[in-house]
Amino acid sequence: MLQKKICMLGATAVGKTSLVRRFVESIYSDEYHTSVGVKIDRKPVRVKEKDLVMVLWDIYGADEFQSLRMDYLNGMFGYLLVADGTRKSTINDALTIQESVAKDFAKMPFVFLLNKADLKDEWEAGADLEQNLTARGWTVMHSSAKTGEAVEEAFHTLGGKMLR
Amino acid sequence: MAAKAMDTGALIEALLRSQGLAVFARVGEGRFRAIGNFPDWLAEIGGAQAAPDGTLQLGERFPFVENFLVDAEQLWKAESVEHKNSGLWIEKGADGREVALEASALWLLGMPILLLRNPQETFQDQSRWLQTARQSRLKHDRLGREIQKKEILLHCIVHDLSQPLSAMRGCFSCLNLEAQPGAIHRLIETGLKQSRVQENMIREILAAFSDELGGQPGSPQKTSAPSDIAASASEVVRDYSAAFADKGVRIELDSRVDLSRDWKVAGDESRLRRIFANLVENSLRVSPANSTVTLGVSDEDRFVLAYVDDEGPGFPGGQAPVFSLFGKGKEQGGKAGLGLYFCRITVEGWGGTIGCEQRPAGGARFWFRIPRAEQEPKSAPAPVKSTGQGDANLKRNGLSVSPPESGGHVQQNEARRPMETTWRPLRVLLAEDTVVNQELMTIMLEKRGHSLVAVGNGREVLAALDRDHFDLVLMDQEMPELNGTETTKAIREKERGTGKHLPIVGVTGVAAMGGREVCLAAGMDACLPKPFQVDQLYETIENLVFDPGAKARATGPAPGGSAVNKTPLNYLSGNKKFVRRLVGVFLADSAKRFTEIQRAVARRDAQKLATLAHALAGSVGVFDATSVAETARKLEAMGRSGDFTGTDAAFDSFAQEYAKLRVQLRGMVSENAKSVKKTERKKPRRTRQKKRRK
Amino acid sequence: MGAKAASRETPTKILIADDDRTTRLFLSEIMKTAGYAVTVASDGKEALKKLKKGKFDLVLLDVWMPNMNGIEVLTALRQEAAPPKVVIMTTDGTPETVLKAIREQAFRYMKKPIDPDALIDTVQQAIAAKPETLPIEVISARPTWVELLLPCDLGVAERVERFLLDLKTDLPEETRRSIGTAFHELLSNAVEWGGKLDPNRKVRISCVRTDRMVMYRIADPGPGFRFENLKHAAVSNPEEDPAAHFREREEMGLRPGGLGLLMTRQLVDELVYNEAQNEVLFVKYLDKKEDEPA
C-alpha cells in the first residue's frame, strides 16, 4: 500500500488540526484546543487512479512558546502550508516557514491554504498577495475547515503533486 | 524469618513499570526486543504485534518513531554517550483520550536502547499552559487591532465632520458679503457663531479623546512642534530591545547616523515614534532569529529620509504591501495594514512620502521621507565669507546664503519680490476639488474684486500655469492626483533658477496634521486653516502681493468684500438723501474741530487737545474711518498725558488721514462716481467760520 | 422686519444724548428707521432736563459730554421715580467707566463705534426687560478687583456677564472666550440651582485680575449641591444616554444647556469648589507663550 507522509505546517491557531479533523473524520469544532506534540493520522485516498494512504503529520504551530523541529519533516513527500486569512501575521509566518523548508527540501510540493474562508468579513489577505504568489508558481486556495470548503481539493491537489 | 534475597532484577522491572517505561533493545534495523514487561499504556493504545521471531517493528507500529529512528540510528552507530529525545507525539487511547508519548535513544552498556515513555502529567500541564498562553496572545492581538481601527476611525470621522462645517461657514460668510437688512444679517451672524461653536466642539472632542493619536490635529493648544527624528529613532530602538531580544533578533540604530547633527523635522515627536514603532513591529514579525533590524536617518537636503531595514524575506516576487485603508471585505488590511495606513496619512500630512523596497542583499526597507523643520531666520546673520560677485547677485534677488554651520542652505527672505503699492484686482488661480468649496471661494474672491480661474486638482494647476499668467495661486491641500504640497513643490521646481516666485497660499482642513509646517516646507508662502473668516482670506492673499498701505491707495476699483457690512454707515446706505445730509454735517463740524485741534497743538493746550481729539475720534466712528480715529486717539493720549513729544508729527499724520477721509466722503456723495484726485494739501479748505449759535 | 418696535399703541420713546452732531444724527436715524420715537440732547444738563419733563422708555447716553457727563446724568436719574433704562455709550474703554456704569445700574454699556444691529438688539432687550431694574450692588470696583452682589435672575446675570467681558479687552480672544463661557455656565448654575431663580436671593461674584492670572469666584446662596444630585448636568449622564440631562432639565424648568460643568473644566486652568459646594472658584493663567508662531 503506497504510503506518503504529509506535514501540516503553519503558525498557531491557523486551523491545521481542524483541517485534518475535517478531512479525516468530517467533524469540526469551534473550540480552540492548542496542539502540543505531533498527531499522526492516516487517510486512504484515491488520486490519479492510484490508491494512496496519506500519513498526515499534524505538527503544532511554531511561535514564541514552541519552535518547530525541522527533523519532524524528514521523509515527507509534501506539505500543506496553512495561514489564517483573518490574521495577516500568519501569512508572513507561512512565508517564512516556506522559505526554511525550501532550503532543506528542494522542490518539495506544497499547497498554500488561506484558511477560515468562512470569516470573509474579517479577511485580511489581499488579492494582490494571491496574485503575486500564484505568479511565483504557488497553488493558493481559500479553505474553511468549518464549512469544508476546498478541504478535499486541497489534499487531493497536494496528492496529485506528490505523485508526479 | 528468612530474609528475602534482594532480587535486583525484579525491583528494576517493577520500577520501570511504575514509571511507565517501555524499554527495547535494538536487534536489527527497525527491529526491537522488549526488555521487561510492557507498561499499561501500551495495551491502552492497542498494544504492539510481535513478529514471528518475537521482535517488534516499532517503526512500523509508530510512524513517529520511524521518523525518530533515523536520528536514533545515527546515535547508536556513533555509540554516543548523549541521548536523544523525540519530542511528544499523541496516540489515541481508550475512549479517545490523548495519550502522550515520547521516545529516547540511548547507548547503554554497549547496547542500543530505545525507551518509550508516557509523560502524561507533563503533557497535561504543558497543554494547559500553552492553551492559556496562546489564547491570551490571540486575544491581545485582536484587541490591538480593534484599538487601532478605532483610532483611525475617529480621525476619519472628525475629518468628515469638518467638511460640511467648513461649507456651512463658507455659505454664511458669503451671505454676509451682501449688504443685508438688519434682521437677516443678525441671523447670519448667529449661524456663523454657531458654526464656530461647533468647530470648537470638534476640537475639544479631539483633545479629550484622541490622546493616542498624539499631537491632536487641529488642537487649539498645540501645533506640531518640530522634533528630532534621530532622537525618536534611538528611543524606539531602546523601547523595543527587550521584545527583540526575546525573539533573538537584534535591533540597532545605524552606526553611520551622526546624532550630533540637526535632525529637526516638521513632525511631532509622539507621532514620529508611533510611525517608527509600526515599522519596527512589522520588521520584528518577519525577522528570523539572529538577524538584525536597523533604523536610520539620512540627510536629503530639505528632507530627511528615515528607514527601517530588516533581514526578513523581503518581498519575494514583488509582493509589496500597499499602505491603504482597512475596509470590511475590501482589499488590504490587517494590523500591519492599519498601522501602515496611519503611517502614510501622518507622513503625507507632514508633506512627506512613504514606501518600501526590497534590499539588494535581501530583506526589506521601509522608508519615509519628511521635510525638515522650517528654519527660523536668524536675527543677526553671521558674516558670510565674501565670494564676490555670486553673493552680491544673490543678495540683489532677496536671497542670502546662510552661514556654513547650517549646511549652506539657501534661505529665502520675507521680501521675495517688490510688494505692490497700489491695490488692484488680482488674477487668482483657485485649486479646490470640492464643488461647494469652489463655489464659495469664487463668490468670496469675486466679491472682493479679484478675478479667478478654478481648477479641480494639482495637475490642472500646473497646466493652467503653463497656459496663463496668474498673480497668485490659492490651493486646497487635499486634492486628488496631485495634492497641494506636491503641486507646490512642482511649481517651485520649475521656478528654480528663473528668479520668479509665484505667491502660493495653501488651505488646510481642521483635522489636518502638521498643517502650517507642511505648507511652508513645501514652498508655500502662507497657510489658511479651514474654516476661515472671509477677512482672513483677503488679508492672507493680499499681504503677499501688496504692501500695507496699498488698500488705501486704490485708484481704479476699490476692494470690495467684507468692508461692506462693517461700516455702520452702510446700514443706512439705502437712504441716499440722509447719507448726503449726514456727510454734510460731518464735513462741516469736523472741519471746525480740525482747526481747533490745530490751534490746540500749536498752543500746546493739553486739555483742549484731549477733549477735541476724543470727540473727533468718536465722530468718525460712523464712517468706520479707523486710520483717522487712530491718529486722533494718539493726539488725545498726548493731550491727556500732557507729553507733547512728537505731537507735530502725530498731527501731520492725523491731518493726512483726515484729508483722505474728506476726499473719500466727498466722492461718496458727489454725482460723479469716479474719485477726484486732488493734490493733497495739509490743510483742508477753510470753510467760512460761522459762529455757533447757542 | 424684526427691527420694528413691538406692537404698542404709542411708539417707544428714546432719548439720545451726545455732544457730537454727526453721532446724534446717525443714531437718531437708525432708531427712527427702527420705529422708535426719538428726542435728542447735546449735553448732560439738557438731557436731564428733558428726562425729567418727558416720559422716556430708554436713554442712550454718551459718557463724555460737556456740562454734565453721562455717568452724572445716570446717577441723577436714579433719584427719579421710574427711571428709564440707560445704555451708556463711549469710545472710552476704561474699566473705571464700566464699573461706574454698573454701580449706577446702567442697563448696558456699549463701545463706540456703535454697530447698528447690536444697538437695535440692545434697545429691544432693554425695553423687554422687567420694569424694575433689579439692583446690582457693587462691593468693590477696582479694575483689579471687582466684587458684585446680584439678585438671582438670569437677565441680571446676562447683564453682568456683558459688563465683565468688556473689562477684559486686553486679553487674547481665545482667553476671553474661554473665560466668558466658563463664567456664563457657572453663574447660570449659581442663579438657577443655588438661588432657584429667586430675585430676592443674591449671588456674590468676585473677579480678580493679577499680572499672571484671572480668577473668578462665584458664591450662590443655596445649600450647595452634590454631584450625585446633578441629574440635570451632563456630567452625571449614564454612558448609554448622553442626553439624559436634557430631559431632567426640561422637567425642572431649567434652561437648555447643562454641558457647563463638563466643558468648563476644559476651558479653565483650575477649578475648585468649597466644602458645601456652593462656592466655586476658577483660574485662567495668562503667562502662556503665544501658541501660533508669528
Image: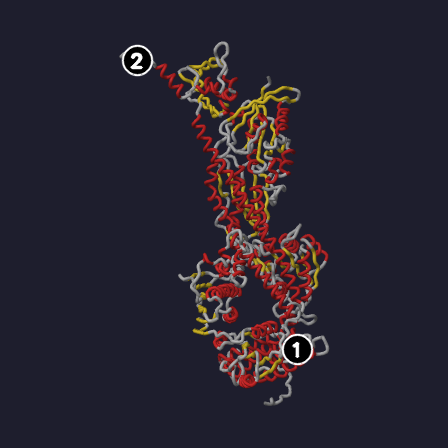
Residue B534 can be seen, yes or no: yes
Q: Residue at x 45, y 20 (%)?
A: B41
Q: Which image quadrant: the N terminus of chain B?
A: top left
- Residue B74 is situated, as x and y percent measured from the top left of the image, at 48, 19
The reply to whether residue A96 is in sight is no
Q: Residues within 10 Å of mark 2 (few under 14, many from 20)?
A: few
**Residue C126 occupies quadrant:** bottom right
Left or right of B448 on screen, residue B642:
left
Whole-percent x, y for residue A95 in the image: 57, 34
Picture quarter containing residue B332? Answer: top right
Residue at numbered disc 1: B665
Say which of marks 2 and 1 sits in front.
2
Residue in the foreground of this view, choosing between B93 and B404? B93
Q: Are marks 2 and 1 on the same chain?
A: yes
Residue B532 placement (x, y as % from top left): 61, 61
For residue B254, side relative to residue B530 (left or right): left
Residue kind at label 1, given as amino acid type: Leu
Pointer 2 indicates a residue of which chain? B
Dot 1, how many residues are within 10 Å of its Cα: few (below 14), some (14-19), or many (20+)? some
> Which residue corresponds to mark 2?
B4
